[in-house]
Image (cartoon, grey):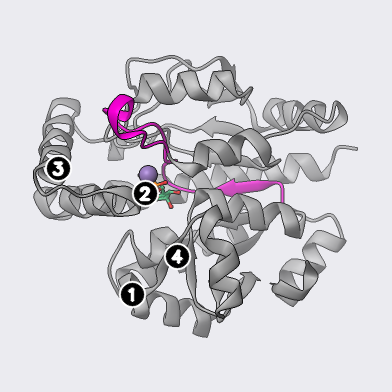
Amino acid sequence: MLNYLDICPEVKDAIDNDRPVVALESTIISHGMSYPENVESAKRCEEEIRQAGGTPATIAIIGGRMKVGLTDEELNYFGKTGLSILKASRRDIPMILAKKLDGATTVATTMMIAELAGIKVFATGGIGGVHRNAQTTFDISADLMELAQTNVAVVCAGAKSILDIGLTLEYLETHGVPVIGYQTDDFPAFYTRTSGFSVDYNGESAKVIAEAIKVKEHLKLVGGMVIANPIPEEYALEESYINKVIDEAVADAEAKGIRGKEITPFILSAILDITEGKSLYANKQLVYNNARVATMIAKELCHMS
Ligand code: PSU
Ligand code: MN
């Protein structure tokens, strides 16, 4: 296994000495934003984690190696190469590694690689989920299966309403994945602080969330955890406005017959186009906020046995 995994010295040192480490994904860099904004925002995420007292570990696949912690050069390469890097979900790993290709890790593969490296907390924007009309398309993100089997806590701003949020929460319940709100009773919908659905539990502090992660570990309960951290009020978008934009983007994908792994990136970029940057600003701010909360949780975890 270690033969495919490169953990950068700074991250390795932090893991070995039980200092807080937070994983970050790379699909958001190569498929979620364009260059050079994607690199700037990836660096700012790392900076937020450092300032909060943690070590960032951006995860990606480069030349068939699973990288945990990227150099500035690697991050730049990833941002510049952008969309021509393969979006790598769990099923893509064997061929990408065998062919020594590059891969942008989704929530699913970032969790998988974080677990291999011994990292317990991961910050991202939004998780994938059950798509609208999954009854007929069967389109359910591999992120959810990963949450069912991989022991990493994912701090996110909920899920975008490009998905069927109700069905996504049902799926997580079936698979025994705890869904915890960070200082909220509502499950957030990425751009907005509420979605009309509740979370199972309100985690009032990073400490109580870290305690829940520890309990899970002690009892050997397999699987991840969703920590839903709402976008800060000042950056939230107006609900009726963004919902209309999302409906339009989903309809566009349907009309063009977009399928499979292309759907999520297509809809995300359609939203960016329609909102002319407004959604991008909110997106960045909520990821920084998730990076800060993830670091607080990772710090608490380090103090527990
Ligand atoms: N949802 C977002 N932003 C994202 C993604 C999803 O709001 O950037 C990305 C993440 O990397 C996520 C992936 O893991 O898309 C899910 O893709 P799919 O639906 O094809 O599983
Ligand atoms: Mn899908």
Q: To which residue does mark 2 refer?
A: 285
Which residue ends up furthest to the bottom in the rendered image? 73
Q: Which residues are magenta?
A: 119-140
Q: Secondary structure at mark 1?
A: helix
Q: Gap in Å between the C-alphas at discs 1 and 4? A: 18 Å
Q: Gap in Å between the C-alphas at discs 3 and 1? A: 22 Å
Q: How many C-alpha atoms fall within 10 Å of the one at disc 1: few (<14), some, or many (≥20)?
A: few
Q: Nearer the viewer, mark 4 or mark 3?
A: 3
Q: To which residue does mark 1 refer?
A: 84
Q: Is mark 2 within 8 Å of ligand 1?
A: no
Q: Position of residue 49 (x, y in %)?
A: 58, 56
In screen coordinates, is 142 left or right of 266? right
User: Closer to the camera, 130 or 186?
Assistant: 130
| Magenta span main SS | loop
In screen coordinates, is 106 left or right of 56? left
Q: Gap in Å between the C-alphas at discs 4 and 2? A: 12 Å
C-beta proximity under 8 Å, tags 2 and 1: no
Q: Earlier in the sequence, mark 4 or mark 2?
A: 4
Q: To which residue does mark 4 refer?
A: 42
Which three-letter amino acid code belongs to the residue tagged 1?
Ser
Q: Secondary structure at mark 4?
A: helix
Q: Gap in Å between the C-alphas at discs 2 and 1? A: 26 Å
Q: Nearer the viewer, mark 2 or mark 1?
A: 1
Q: Earlier in the sequence, mark 3 or mark 2?
A: 3
Q: Secondary structure at mark 3?
A: helix
